[in-house]
Image (spheres, grey):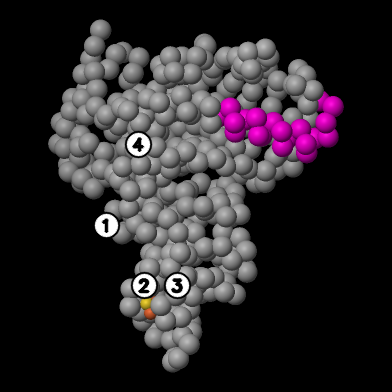
């Protein structure tokens, strides 16, 4: 049985840069005078932090006479200020030019800034349609709890789009065919509220290590999506008995490729229900660290299975869906709010054609 989805027929192909919060760098990467320079949603940007931990993310061009502020051109961070390599103008983390080597700083010399947010040491920048300010905020970060590991990050780059990668959160059918999970089932209705989407499902499976060792897993997961650049998956693993969080942070680079940053941390490993590769004999901090390394490595392996599909697929504007794919329709409607022509879409829905 095949149904078609009339709303989705007229949707535009995803534009390369949906509005939202996108990962820039970890606080560690910005520490101790480091300057980040990258292409981020088609823009050349720089980011750094000062000694007080204030972060600045700005367009990577100097408002004086337009020098690139890339480190390879000679830009330096000196006492928390960015120093332009062309004439030595200095900018503090508010973006203001506060000194030049040969005259008082012009008051109008200000870097073009992006709004940033620190979420558990992961720095996000806001990319607004037409440069407009943040339309929503990321959620409050969970408290740093005792009994949890540090957060580790790993980034994959490949041709892709954040709408396509985030669609996996509601595409339960692929979990069996791409990842080999068993007994995948939804545990609550899909929730959508503005820029927030929640998808809850359980699954089971078996980790295989080198063909010799197998470990069954039995997982309850809740995925919290806050725009197409931020997904947090909360896991409760019931076989060993521990918790994990996985962040899937999809960031368009140049309109063709995305950087998919994966970040994990694990907790509640004090009393594993089953021996886990001898971890039980190690002190808790070591146990957490090793388990988190394993979790990030395994998450990367699973995502690499998706990448095989993602980097070769094309966007299907008019998906031919079966009965159990209904949430993909809801997801596609949710995504419309992040693109330029949302006004046109709202009009169409209000007019009763949606
Ligand atoms: S262009 Fe940057 S100081 Fe002149
Ligand atoms: Fe997947």
Main secondary structure of the magenta stretch: helix
Q: Nearer the viewer, mark 4 or mark 1?
A: 4
The mark lying in front, picked from 1 and 2, is: 2
Mark earlier in primary sequence (4, 1): 1
Residue ID at (62%, 64%): 32
Which corner quadrant of the figure contains ligand 1? Answer: bottom left
* Relative horizontal placement of residue 247, taking residue 334 as reference (left or right): right
- x, y percentage for residue 214? 66, 13
Mark identifier at residue 66: none
In reply to whether residue 284 is colored magenta, the answer given is yes
Distance Cα–Cα, label 1 vs label 2? 24 Å
Q: Is residue 318 visible?
A: yes
Q: Which residue is mark 2?
A: 67
Distance between the Cα atoms at labels 3 and 1?
A: 20 Å
Residue 95: which numbered mark, if any? 3
Ligand 1 under 8 Å from disc 1 Cβ: no
- Residue at x-position 72% and y-position 37%: 289
Q: Quadrant of the C terminus?
A: top left
The answer to whether residue 222 is above or below residue 156 is: above
**Label ID, residue 160:** 4
Q: Which residues are magenta?
A: 280-299
Q: Position of residue 106 (x, y in %)?
A: 39, 86
- Residue carrying label 1: 130
Kindly report the distance in space between the C-alpha atoms of the residues bearing marks 3 and 4. Answer: 32 Å
- Element type where label 4 sits in the image: loop
Circles 2 and 4: CB atoms closer than 8 Å: no
């Amino acid at each position: 049985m095949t149904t078609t989805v009339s709303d989705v027929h007229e949707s535009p192909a995803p534009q390369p840069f949906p509005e939202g919060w996108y990962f820039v760098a970890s606080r560690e990467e910005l520490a101790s005078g480091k300057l980040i320079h990258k292409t981020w949603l088609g823009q050349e940007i720089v980011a750094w932090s000062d000694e007080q931990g204030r972060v600045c993310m700005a367009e990577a061009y100097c408002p004086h006479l337009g020098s690139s502020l890339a480190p390879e051109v000679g830009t330096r961070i000196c006492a928390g200020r960015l120093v332009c390599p062309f004439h030595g103008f200095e900018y503090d983390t508010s973006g203001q030019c506060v000194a030049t080597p040969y005259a008082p700083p012009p008051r109008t010399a200000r870097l073009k800034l992006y709004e940033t947010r620190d979420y558990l040491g992961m720095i996000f920048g806001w990319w607004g349609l037409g440069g407009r300010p943040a339309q929503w905020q990321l959620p409050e970060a969970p408290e740093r709890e005792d009994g949890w590991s540090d957060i580790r990050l790993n980034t994959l780059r490949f041709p892709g789009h954040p709408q396509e990668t985030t669609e996996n959160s509601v595409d339960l059918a692929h979990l069996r065919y791409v990842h080999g999970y068993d007994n995948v089932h939804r545990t609550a209705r899909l929730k959508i509220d503005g820029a927030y989407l929640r998808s809850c499902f359980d699954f089971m499976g078996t980790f295989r290590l080198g063909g010799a060792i197998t470990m069954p897993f039995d997982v309850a997961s809740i995925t919290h999506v806050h725009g197409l650049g931020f997904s947090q998956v909360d896991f409760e693993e019931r076989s060993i008995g521990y918790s994990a969080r996985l962040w899937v942070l999809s960031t368009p680079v140049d309109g063709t490729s995305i950087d998919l940053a994966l970040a994990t941390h694990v907790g509640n490993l004090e009393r594993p229900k089953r021996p886990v590769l001898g971890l039980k004999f190690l002190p808790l901090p070591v146990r957490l660290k090793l388990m988190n390394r394993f979790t990030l490595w395994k998450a990367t392996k699973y995502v690499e299975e998706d990448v095989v599909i993602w980097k070769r697929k094309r966007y299907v504007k008019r998906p031919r869906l079966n009965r159990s794919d209904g949430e993909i329709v809801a997801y596609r409607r949710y995504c419309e709010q992040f693109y330029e022509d949302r006004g046109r879409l709202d009009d169409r829905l209000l007019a009763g054609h949606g």
